[in-house]
Amino acid sequence: MALVTQYTHFPKELLSATAETLHTLFSNPTLFHLSGKHKEPLFISVLLHGNETTGFLALQKLLLKYSQQQQQLPRSLSFFLGNTEAASLEVRRLEGQPDYNRTWPGTELAETNETQIMQEIVDIMRKKNIFASIDVHNNTGLNPHYACVNKLDNQFLQLANLFGRLVVYFTRPKGVQSGAFAEICPAVTLECGKPGQQHGVDHAFEYLNSCLHLSQLSDHPVLSQDIAVYHTVAQVKVNEDINFSFEDPQTDLLLDKDLERMNFTEISAGTQFGSIYINNKIPLTAKNEKGQIVTENFFSIIDNTLQITKNTMPSMLTLDERVIRQDCFCYLMEKLKL
Ligand SMILES: [Zn+2]
């Protein structure tokens, strides 16, 4: 029995819904297929994280444009509305739900209803001869807009470069949407800054519309002056037994409030991250893409300050303590020579 509800039209209410009210229209995972001039569909997923609304608003703007002008889509468009239940409560996911961007084929999580649904979506899109896949997200810290790829392939980099100069290449975590689709077509994840910013919606909308107009993706390499590709070399978490704060000095680890300004900035060895008020054990754990612990390759404690020990570039640093606990503290990256 199919787990995913599929439609070939959408109700006009979709054009005026908000991410919070969407759940009243579509309470189950829902996949839409709209036909256009080129038959191989562009696939877009939004709201895999319920509080990351930019992708939904950009998609809505795209649907509005073509329905108002009664214009045929230049290419068929399939789209998936992800965790509408979490969106109704403006959270990433509900307690007890898995992360909807860790349950796609290739996941290391045990099989659940969600992993079956995501497998089914990939199977359906493969049969439709999918052209390319775009998964739209937001993040919490001060980060520029960038696209992520899971394969260093010219077509993937061309697709990513259409969004902007900055590209991140990663192979972990597993079970992400773009990692699953990378097996069947060029695929990207877009990171559109913080939610609630109109320029993020406009940028994502322009990008989606450009992708709909592509007749093909070039196999040629992107000119090196037009692209900067960074590879994630470590994911950093604060150890669970550590209390941390950006404000309160009565804590184990007092983090610097300027940290998020370092996102996508090359920082040099000796850059301080905060002060330590407990024993001299590094309060963070850094893991490389193989899952090996590499904390001491990147951090040390000198005179009670937590310092970085080699030149690197952080991303996803945020001042949101809940996100640091639920997701991670930051990623560390290195520039790739293509
Ligand atoms: Zn996200």
Image (cartoon, rainbow, N blue to C red):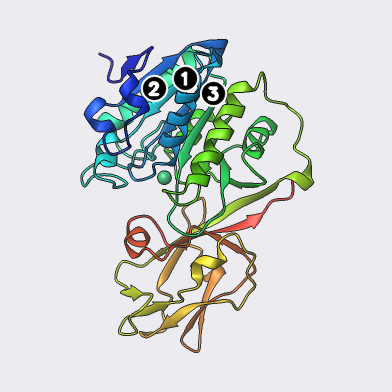
For label 3, the SS is: loop
Q: Total number of numbered labels?
A: 3
Residue closest to the eye, 83 or 73? 73
**Secondary structure at numbered mark 2:** helix
Q: Is residue 189 visible?
A: no
Please state the horizontal and vertical placement of residue 197, each as a whole percent of the image: 46, 49
Specify the amino acid type for callout 1.
Answer: Gln
Location of residue 124 in the rendering, given as x and y in whole percent from the top left corner: 42, 16
Tell me the amino acid under the disc marked 2: Ile
User: Where is the C terminus found, in terms of image quarters?
Assistant: top right
Identify the residue shown where x is 44% and y is 82%.
Answer: 275
Say if residue 21 shows up in the picture. yes
Q: Earlier in the sequence, mark 1 or mark 2?
A: 1
Q: Is residue 214 above or below residue 91?
A: above
- Residue linked to disc 3: 184
Residue 192 on image: x %, y %: 51, 46
Q: According to the image, label 1 marks what residue? A: 68
Spatial separation of the CA atoms under disc 1 and disc 2: 29 Å
Disc 2: which residue:
121
Query: What residue is shown at x 67% (from left), y 20% (from top)?
Result: 216
Ligand 1, what quadrant? top left
* Residue at x-position 46% and y-position 59%: 141
Q: Is residue 1 above or below residue 87?
A: above
Cβ of mark 1 under 8 Å from ligand 1: the answer is no
Q: Earlier in the sequence, mark 1 or mark 3?
A: 1
For the residue pair 184 and 34, the one nearer the viewer reads as 34
Number of the label disc, if any, that sits on residue 214: none
- The correct choice, above or below, for 235 with respect to 200 in the image is below
User: How many residues crowd mark 2 within 10 Å: few (<14), some (14–19), many (20+)?
Assistant: many
Vertical placement of 44 versus 87: above or below? above
Proximity of marks 3 and 2: CB atoms separated by less than 8 Å? no
